Image (cartoon, rainbow, N blue to C red):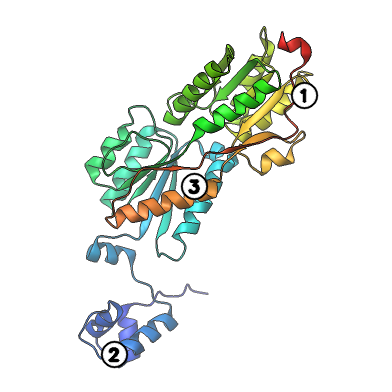
Amino acid sequence: MSPQKRPTIADIAAAAGVSKGAVSYALNGKPGVSEQTRARVLELAARMGWHPSSAARALSDGRSGAIGLVVDRPAWVLGIEPFFTQLISGVQAQLAGTGTALMLQVTEDAAAEEAAYRRWWGERRVDGVLLVDLREDDPRLGLLAELGLPAVVVGHADPAPGRPSVWLDDGAAVREVLAYLAAMGHRRIARVAGPAHFVHTRERGEDFAAAAGELDLSEVRCVHADYSGDEGARATRRLLSGANRPTAVVYDNDVMAVAALGVAQEMGIAVPGELSVVAWDDSELCRLVHPALTAVSRSVPDYGRRVAAALLALIDGEDVPDTRLDAPVLVPRGSTAPAAARARR
């Protein structure tokens, strides 16, 4: 069976018995045709499955009808990390019914990501982009300003006109997690963080240090990984093999925390009897493992909806302020318990 031919304005004109110009006027809501002809053309267009060409629309009004998201992570890491799946689901929910599509591209280095923005801008593929994983001295901000491509930062960014950010207040959640662990007698607490060059990694680290100082926790330390289960497992082995091993570890994502459970079992360390584990970002993974993981819960789909709404407003020329969303909350489960008496000394 040959593929169905896409209907054109010429096809609609032939079916309606009018000129192509009349069809164009009718479809674009312009004067020049009677209301009876306009109604007939619109009815035929809908019946024939006609949709406006995004390329033609971009030429006429400068809009492509799409927003872009580039994720600079290996595809296999992205495929197992629930955060981005949930974020994208929220973005799609916000775009539903707006006639705007989401263009997603996965890259594995910064140069490829920057090339994607240049190509999208040159080909008029997107009207704006969502910028994730903001880095220290991020060159993407200057590039997007140079291109004149509207962008909303997913995460906290230094205030700058025309570059709004939408972020979650991790500081309150960090203090809640450390206070909870301290109340159960934990003093040797480690954090397995994401890549050090991400702004959100650095800011969460600053929050950890501040909260540890307030709680008089002098043995809080941090190691970095790449959010993958393999790197999370390696970091956990190093922490648990050293002298004065931690009695509690907080992981920057759920995948690394799940991997930690396997390492603890491998090393004969009981969770939560000898080691408490906390995951950042609650997910189905946290609830399916045994013991279920204590986790920091934030509504990532709602986060996706909010950043998409901000970008659409920015594209429409509205003044979009920086927006701080509600703080995540701690959800205690079976992976945390009071520190063993000998570990408190």
Dot 2 crowding, Cα within 10 Å, few <14, some 14–19, many 20+: few
Q: Is residue 166 visible?
A: yes
- In the rendered view of the protein, which quadrant contains the C terminus? top right
2 or 3: tag closer to the N-terminus: 2
Residue 265 circle label: 1
Q: Is residue 4 left or right of residue 76?
A: left
**Compared with residue 60, is residue 345 higher up or lower down, i.e. above or below?**
above
Relative placement, left or right, of 56 versus 204 is left
| N-term mark: 3 or 1 | 1
Q: Residues within 10 Å of mark 1 (few under 14, many from 20)?
A: few
Tag of residue 303: 3
Q: CA distance from mark 3 to mark 1?
A: 35 Å
Q: Nearer the viewer, mark 2 or mark 3?
A: 3
For residue 35, the mark is 2
Q: Is residue 21 above or below residue 339?
A: below
Badge 3 crowding class, 10 Å Cα cut-off, few under 14, some 14 to 19, many 20 or more, is many
Estimate the spatial distance between the alpha carbons at disc 1 and disc 2, rounded to whole Å. 74 Å
Q: Residue at x 25, y 91 (%)?
A: 34
Tags 2 and 3 touching, CB below 8 Å: no
**Which is nearer the eye, 268 or 331?**
331
Q: Is residue 197 left or right of residue 30?
A: right
